[in-house]
Amino acid sequence: MKSNFPPCVYAETLLELPNLSASDTHVAEQYLPMIVEYYKQSLLTHQKALSYLETVYGISSAVALEHSIGYSDRSLGLELPSAKDNAGEILRGSLKRLRVFKGTGHEAFRGCIVVPVMSGDSIAGFYAERINRVCRKAKSQYFVRLYPHCLFATSQCDGHPEVYLCASPLLAIQLTESIHQPAFATDHSFNVRGEDCAYLADAGVDRVIVVAQSHTAPEHLKQLTRRLKKFDLKYRKIDNFTEVVYGTA
Protein backbone atom coordinates (compact mmCIF):
# COMPACT_ATOMS: atom_id res chain seq x y z
CA MET A 1 0.00 0.00 0.00
CA LYS A 2 1.26 3.43 -0.87
CA SER A 3 2.05 5.83 1.94
CA ASN A 4 -0.26 8.83 2.35
CA PHE A 5 2.03 11.68 1.30
CA PRO A 6 0.95 15.22 0.44
CA PRO A 7 0.26 15.80 -3.27
CA CYS A 8 3.26 16.49 -5.47
CA VAL A 9 3.02 20.15 -6.39
CA TYR A 10 5.49 21.97 -8.61
CA ALA A 11 5.01 25.72 -8.97
CA GLU A 12 6.76 27.54 -11.80
CA THR A 13 7.38 30.58 -9.61
CA LEU A 14 8.70 28.43 -6.75
CA LEU A 15 8.49 31.36 -4.34
CA GLU A 16 5.83 29.96 -2.00
CA LEU A 17 6.97 27.57 0.69
CA PRO A 18 6.29 23.88 0.07
CA ASN A 19 4.18 21.80 2.43
CA LEU A 20 6.77 19.31 3.64
CA SER A 21 6.08 16.20 5.68
CA ALA A 22 8.47 14.76 8.27
CA SER A 23 9.57 12.25 5.63
CA ASP A 24 10.26 15.05 3.15
CA THR A 25 12.43 16.81 5.73
CA HIS A 26 14.36 13.59 6.31
CA VAL A 27 14.91 13.23 2.55
CA ALA A 28 16.07 16.87 2.42
CA GLU A 29 18.64 16.28 5.14
CA GLN A 30 19.91 13.02 3.66
CA TYR A 31 19.66 13.48 -0.10
CA LEU A 32 19.95 17.20 -0.91
CA PRO A 33 23.65 17.40 0.11
CA MET A 34 24.35 14.36 -2.08
CA ILE A 35 22.47 15.95 -4.98
CA VAL A 36 24.47 19.17 -4.57
CA GLU A 37 27.67 17.11 -4.68
CA TYR A 38 26.42 15.27 -7.78
CA TYR A 39 25.72 18.57 -9.54
CA LYS A 40 29.18 19.86 -8.53
CA GLN A 41 30.87 16.88 -10.15
CA SER A 42 28.65 17.25 -13.20
CA LEU A 43 29.75 20.87 -13.63
CA LEU A 44 33.40 19.85 -13.82
CA THR A 45 32.68 17.52 -16.76
CA HIS A 46 30.67 20.04 -18.82
CA GLN A 47 32.92 22.62 -20.45
CA LYS A 48 29.97 24.58 -21.80
CA ALA A 49 28.67 25.19 -18.28
CA LEU A 50 32.14 26.14 -17.01
CA SER A 51 32.61 28.51 -19.94
CA TYR A 52 29.23 30.13 -19.23
CA LEU A 53 30.24 30.90 -15.64
CA GLU A 54 33.62 32.27 -16.72
CA THR A 55 32.33 34.31 -19.68
CA VAL A 56 29.15 35.75 -18.17
CA TYR A 57 30.19 36.17 -14.53
CA GLY A 58 33.95 35.78 -14.39
CA ILE A 59 33.52 32.83 -12.03
CA SER A 60 36.35 30.31 -12.26
CA SER A 61 35.97 26.60 -11.56
CA ALA A 62 37.77 27.08 -8.24
CA VAL A 63 35.33 29.79 -7.13
CA ALA A 64 32.43 27.66 -8.37
CA LEU A 65 33.55 24.76 -6.18
CA GLU A 66 33.97 27.11 -3.22
CA HIS A 67 30.28 27.99 -3.45
CA SER A 68 29.18 24.43 -4.35
CA ILE A 69 27.94 25.56 -7.76
CA GLY A 70 26.83 22.69 -9.95
CA TYR A 71 25.16 21.80 -13.22
CA SER A 72 22.09 19.70 -13.94
CA ASP A 73 22.69 17.57 -17.04
CA ARG A 74 19.48 15.47 -16.76
CA SER A 75 21.37 12.41 -15.49
CA LEU A 76 20.38 12.60 -11.80
CA GLY A 77 17.25 10.51 -12.27
CA LEU A 78 19.33 7.59 -13.52
CA GLU A 79 21.18 7.51 -10.18
CA LEU A 80 18.01 7.24 -8.07
CA PRO A 81 15.91 4.15 -7.29
CA SER A 82 13.32 3.41 -9.95
CA ALA A 83 9.88 4.97 -9.56
CA LYS A 84 8.46 1.52 -10.30
CA ASP A 85 9.22 0.25 -6.79
CA ASN A 86 7.72 1.61 -3.57
CA ALA A 87 10.93 3.05 -2.10
CA GLY A 88 11.81 4.83 -5.32
CA GLU A 89 8.30 6.23 -5.67
CA ILE A 90 8.37 7.61 -2.11
CA LEU A 91 11.82 9.15 -2.60
CA ARG A 92 10.91 10.76 -5.90
CA GLY A 93 7.67 12.06 -4.40
CA SER A 94 9.64 13.85 -1.70
CA LEU A 95 12.10 15.26 -4.25
CA LYS A 96 9.14 16.65 -6.20
CA ARG A 97 7.86 18.44 -3.11
CA LEU A 98 11.41 19.66 -2.52
CA ARG A 99 11.27 21.12 -6.08
CA VAL A 100 14.26 19.12 -7.35
CA PHE A 101 11.95 17.23 -9.71
CA LYS A 102 8.84 18.40 -11.52
CA GLY A 103 5.48 16.75 -11.13
CA THR A 104 6.11 15.05 -14.47
CA GLY A 105 9.15 13.30 -13.01
CA HIS A 106 11.69 15.34 -14.98
CA GLU A 107 14.54 17.18 -13.31
CA ALA A 108 13.46 20.72 -12.45
CA PHE A 109 16.83 22.32 -13.18
CA ARG A 110 17.91 20.40 -16.27
CA GLY A 111 20.23 22.49 -18.41
CA CYS A 112 20.81 24.95 -15.55
CA ILE A 113 23.66 26.13 -13.39
CA VAL A 114 22.54 25.26 -9.83
CA VAL A 115 23.56 27.14 -6.68
CA PRO A 116 22.51 25.87 -3.23
CA VAL A 117 21.24 28.50 -0.80
CA MET A 118 22.48 27.65 2.68
CA SER A 119 21.09 28.51 6.09
CA GLY A 120 23.75 27.41 8.53
CA ASP A 121 24.57 23.83 7.63
CA SER A 122 21.20 23.20 5.98
CA ILE A 123 20.14 23.68 2.37
CA ALA A 124 17.33 26.26 2.50
CA GLY A 125 16.77 26.50 -1.26
CA PHE A 126 18.26 26.59 -4.73
CA TYR A 127 18.95 29.09 -7.47
CA ALA A 128 19.09 27.77 -11.02
CA GLU A 129 19.97 29.62 -14.24
CA ARG A 130 19.58 28.17 -17.70
CA ILE A 131 22.69 28.37 -19.91
CA ASN A 132 20.98 27.69 -23.24
CA ARG A 133 18.27 29.55 -25.11
CA VAL A 134 14.96 29.31 -23.28
CA CYS A 135 12.35 27.38 -25.26
CA ARG A 136 8.67 26.61 -24.80
CA LYS A 137 7.41 27.54 -21.33
CA ALA A 138 10.71 27.00 -19.52
CA LYS A 139 12.00 29.71 -17.22
CA SER A 140 15.44 31.26 -17.60
CA GLN A 141 15.88 31.45 -13.81
CA TYR A 142 14.45 29.68 -10.78
CA PHE A 143 14.68 30.56 -7.11
CA VAL A 144 13.45 27.71 -4.92
CA ARG A 145 12.68 28.61 -1.32
CA LEU A 146 12.26 25.59 0.97
CA TYR A 147 12.25 27.38 4.32
CA PRO A 148 11.24 30.88 5.54
CA HIS A 149 14.82 32.15 5.83
CA CYS A 150 16.37 31.63 2.41
CA LEU A 151 18.89 34.33 1.56
CA PHE A 152 22.04 33.50 -0.37
CA ALA A 153 25.21 34.86 1.20
CA THR A 154 28.74 34.89 -0.22
CA SER A 155 30.13 35.15 3.33
CA GLN A 156 29.10 36.02 6.87
CA CYS A 157 28.04 39.64 7.28
CA ASP A 158 29.04 39.94 10.94
CA GLY A 159 30.99 43.15 11.43
CA HIS A 160 29.78 44.66 8.14
CA PRO A 161 27.12 47.32 8.78
CA GLU A 162 26.68 47.81 5.03
CA VAL A 163 25.99 44.91 2.64
CA TYR A 164 24.99 44.49 -1.00
CA LEU A 165 21.83 42.75 -2.18
CA CYS A 166 21.89 41.32 -5.71
CA ALA A 167 19.27 39.86 -8.04
CA SER A 168 20.87 36.40 -8.12
CA PRO A 169 23.51 34.36 -6.27
CA LEU A 170 25.74 34.39 -9.36
CA LEU A 171 25.67 38.20 -9.43
CA ALA A 172 26.45 38.24 -5.70
CA ILE A 173 29.46 35.97 -6.20
CA GLN A 174 30.64 38.11 -9.11
CA LEU A 175 30.36 41.23 -6.95
CA THR A 176 32.19 39.73 -3.98
CA GLU A 177 35.02 38.51 -6.19
CA SER A 178 35.42 42.07 -7.51
CA ILE A 179 35.19 44.19 -4.35
CA HIS A 180 35.77 41.62 -1.58
CA GLN A 181 32.70 42.66 0.37
CA PRO A 182 29.86 40.40 1.54
CA ALA A 183 26.92 40.25 -0.84
CA PHE A 184 23.53 38.64 -0.54
CA ALA A 185 20.99 37.59 -3.11
CA THR A 186 17.40 36.54 -3.51
CA ASP A 187 15.35 36.12 -6.70
CA HIS A 188 15.30 38.61 -9.60
CA SER A 189 12.27 40.34 -8.04
CA PHE A 190 14.19 41.02 -4.80
CA ASN A 191 11.61 39.02 -2.90
CA VAL A 192 12.75 38.95 0.74
CA ARG A 193 10.77 37.71 3.72
CA GLY A 194 10.67 39.02 7.25
CA GLU A 195 12.92 36.15 8.35
CA ASP A 196 15.60 37.32 5.90
CA CYS A 197 15.42 40.91 7.15
CA ALA A 198 15.53 39.75 10.76
CA TYR A 199 18.68 37.77 10.00
CA LEU A 200 20.41 40.86 8.56
CA ALA A 201 19.30 43.08 11.45
CA ASP A 202 20.42 40.54 14.06
CA ALA A 203 23.83 40.32 12.33
CA GLY A 204 24.36 44.05 12.82
CA VAL A 205 23.60 45.21 9.29
CA ASP A 206 22.48 48.85 9.15
CA ARG A 207 22.25 49.59 5.42
CA VAL A 208 21.38 47.45 2.41
CA ILE A 209 22.69 48.57 -0.99
CA VAL A 210 20.45 47.10 -3.66
CA VAL A 211 22.18 46.41 -6.97
CA ALA A 212 19.23 46.80 -9.35
CA GLN A 213 19.12 45.47 -12.90
CA SER A 214 17.77 47.25 -15.99
CA HIS A 215 14.71 44.98 -15.93
CA THR A 216 14.01 45.36 -12.18
CA ALA A 217 10.39 46.46 -11.78
CA PRO A 218 9.85 49.63 -9.68
CA GLU A 219 7.04 47.94 -7.72
CA HIS A 220 9.45 45.20 -6.61
CA LEU A 221 11.86 47.81 -5.28
CA LYS A 222 9.04 49.60 -3.45
CA GLN A 223 7.97 46.35 -1.83
CA LEU A 224 11.55 45.65 -0.80
CA THR A 225 11.94 49.12 0.69
CA ARG A 226 8.81 48.68 2.81
CA ARG A 227 10.00 45.32 4.07
CA LEU A 228 13.47 46.62 5.01
CA LYS A 229 12.02 49.65 6.81
CA LYS A 230 10.00 47.38 9.11
CA PHE A 231 13.32 46.14 10.48
CA ASP A 232 14.96 49.60 10.57
CA LEU A 233 17.29 48.69 7.73
CA LYS A 234 18.37 51.66 5.61
CA TYR A 235 18.06 51.30 1.84
CA ARG A 236 20.06 52.61 -1.08
CA LYS A 237 19.72 51.64 -4.74
CA ILE A 238 22.39 51.62 -7.39
CA ASP A 239 21.57 50.86 -10.98
CA ASN A 240 24.17 48.36 -12.11
CA PHE A 241 27.18 46.25 -11.24
CA THR A 242 29.76 48.57 -12.79
CA GLU A 243 28.64 51.42 -10.53
CA VAL A 244 29.73 49.27 -7.58
CA VAL A 245 33.10 48.33 -9.06
CA TYR A 246 34.05 51.64 -10.67
CA GLY A 247 31.68 54.17 -9.14
CA THR A 248 31.09 55.60 -5.70
CA ALA A 249 28.99 52.79 -4.24
Image (cartoon, grey):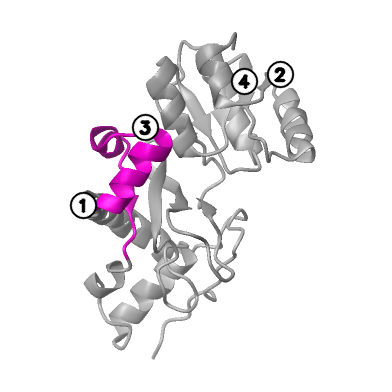
Q: Secondary structure at mark 4?
A: strand
Mark 3: few/some/many CA within 10 Å (<14, 14-19, 20+): some
83 vs 241, nearest the viewer: 241
Q: Quadrant of the C terminus?
A: top right
| Magenta stretch: helix, strand or loop mostly | helix
| Residue assigned mark 3 | 58
Q: CA distance from mark 3 to mark 4?
A: 22 Å
Q: Nearer the viewer, mark 3 or mark 2?
A: 3
| Residue assigned mark 1 | 41
* Residue 136 as seen in the image, left or right of residue 94: right
- Residue at (56, 60) in percent of width and height: 139
Q: CA distance from mark 4 to mark 2?
A: 14 Å
Residue 35: image quadrant is bottom left
43 vs 198, nearest the viewer: 43
Magenta-span inclusion, residue 58: yes
Residue 29: image quadrant is bottom left
Which portion, as a residue range, is magenta? 47-73
**Tag of residue 188:** none
**Tag of residue 232:** 2
How far across and down, in percent of the image, does residue 221 sit? Answer: 74, 33
Query: Marks 1 and 3: in contact by CB < 8 Å?
Result: no
Above or below, 2 against 183 in this view is below
How far across and down, in percent of the image, does residue 177 sit? Answer: 38, 23
Counting residues from the start of the chain, the first of labels 3 and 2 encountered is: 3
Counting residues from the start of the chain, the first of labels 1 and 2 encountered is: 1
| Residue assigned mark 4 | 209
Counting residues from the start of the chain, the first of labels 4 and 2 encountered is: 4
Q: CA distance from mark 1 to mark 4?
A: 34 Å
